[in-house]
Amino acid sequence: MKIHLPNSAFLGNIDPFLRTLDVTNPDKLKITTNKKWISIHPVVLSMVGAIGLTVKPSNINFEKPEAKSKHYLKRMGLFKLLKVSSDIKMTEHEPAGRFIPLTQITDGAALTKFITDMIPLLHLKLEHAESIRYIVSELVRNVLEHSLSPNGALVSAQYYEKSKSIRIGIADTGLGIKKTISQSYPVNSGLSAIRLALSPGITGTTKKEGGTELNAGAGLFFIRSIAKINRDYFMIYSGQAMYKLLKTKKTQRKASLHADPFMDRSSMDEGFPFWQGTAVGIDISLDSTEEFGALLDLIRKTYTKTIKERKKARHQKARFI
Amino acid sequence: MIKIKLFKIVGEFAENKDFARDVRLQKIIPELNNGGEVILDFEGVSGATQSFIHALISDLLRNYGSEVLGKISFKNCNEIVQKIINIVVEYMQESD
């Protein structure tokens, strides 16, 4: 496998990075970096961490980074996670107020601890913390419950002063969305599986409306809704499919929610290199964060309307002969 | 009647579904089966996920019907927690 960390890979321009992933020869991993500058979204780091953990450290060839910003990789804990040496010397700073280094989460208790520690580390006010802890909790629990990834979830996050935003990345190397959703629904492509996974009330664990005692199929719909209402990027990549909710400009009109993710302003493609598992990236602009309570009102309306429509569609018609 | 103080079990952010399931199975259901009522006290809980609330109450609505809401009270819920409880209660009743 080969990964090249480019000059820039954020959610808006992540497609070229994904297209360069080489997932052949899964026993070995070569990581190269842009020689001048590396500026990457946490989801890229989480993906490198997740894929790196599937390879023995002795089979990882991490080409010595030369870019001025190479310290970033060390600060975010990439070399430590992959157990490879870097020769990069730096003064360790307290991470407070800036970032959450790459963290591997393999069980619910570790997730609870991570969320508790995360909010003070990012120095978030409660109104911002509400949506961010919500997103991390639901995404990581999805990985722990559905992905069957032996390495759990790889999570990282960073606060960007210039854009006043928190960017979060979560990746796993588990079953992937198509396999998970197809346990309950017939799906013929990775994108159709993503479409279902992002719709309200759809879970791979059952076809029953309302879900099971533990799963309702609401988690990813909630997260997409948080991004949509805040007009931020949200990307989900699994198998060969990638769906990206695009950032939209703030206008007088309030953003509306659609049950069907394909009705939102988005880009999608099914021709990417095969990612064994799922990677999710999301940006949350703190300046324009919609009040969480108002967001929940919109989610409730859309969710209930969708269930009613689905129920109506299943109604049997009287037969007149 | 029993009162369950959730903060002691789940902390400030109610997101751990394992705890929710344990509370339901070990505390709520036995009390309901004895004909009793349950107060779920959210004092100190500043937020909850839909997954947590779903794991806590969805199976009660499915197995006991909407009438179970007459036997469960939600106390000291802030606006966010109330809204999430309402989402779960609403979609579970619509899913009947």
Image (cartoon, coloured by chain):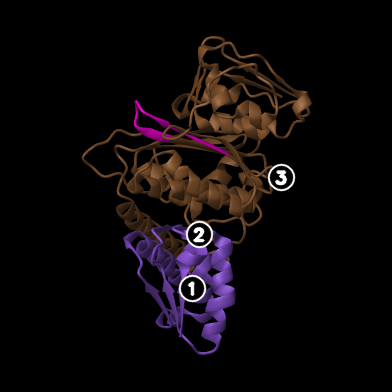
Chain colours: A brown, B purple
* Pointer 1 with pointer 2, Cβ within 8 A: no
The magenta stretch spans which residues?
Answer: A155-166
Q: Secondary structure at mark 2?
A: helix
Up the image or down, B32 lies above or below A159; here it is below
Up the image or down, A184 lies above or below A3; here it is below
| Residue at the disc numbered 1 | B96
| Residue at the disc numbered 3 | A150
Classed neighbour count for the residue bearing mark 3: other residues with Cα under 10 Å, few (<14), some (14–19), many (≥20): few
Residue A319 visible (yes or no):
no
The image quarter in which residue B59 lies: bottom right
Q: Secondary structure at mark 1?
A: loop
Q: Nearer the viewer, residue A133 or A246?
A: A133
Alpha-carbon span between mark 1 and mark 3: 36 Å
Instruction: Report whether A146 appears left or right of A61.
Output: left
> Could you confirm whether marks 3 and 2 are on the same chain?
no
Q: Amino acid at mark 3?
A: Pro
Mark 1 or mark 2, whichever is nearer to me: 2
Q: Outermost residue, left direction?
A: A252
Residue A40 visible (yes or no):
yes
Residue found 50% across the figure and 57% down from its top: B15
Classed neighbour count for the residue bearing mark 1: other residues with Cα under 10 Å, few (<14), some (14–19), many (≥20): few
Provide residue A61's location: percent of width, then percent of height: 72, 19
Provide residue A280's location: percent of width, then percent of height: 53, 39
Q: Amino acid at mark 1?
A: Asp
Residue found 37% across the figure and 34% down from its top: A165
Residue found 44% across the figure and 27% down from its top: A12
| Residue at the disc numbered 2 | B51
Q: Amino acid at mark 2?
A: Ser
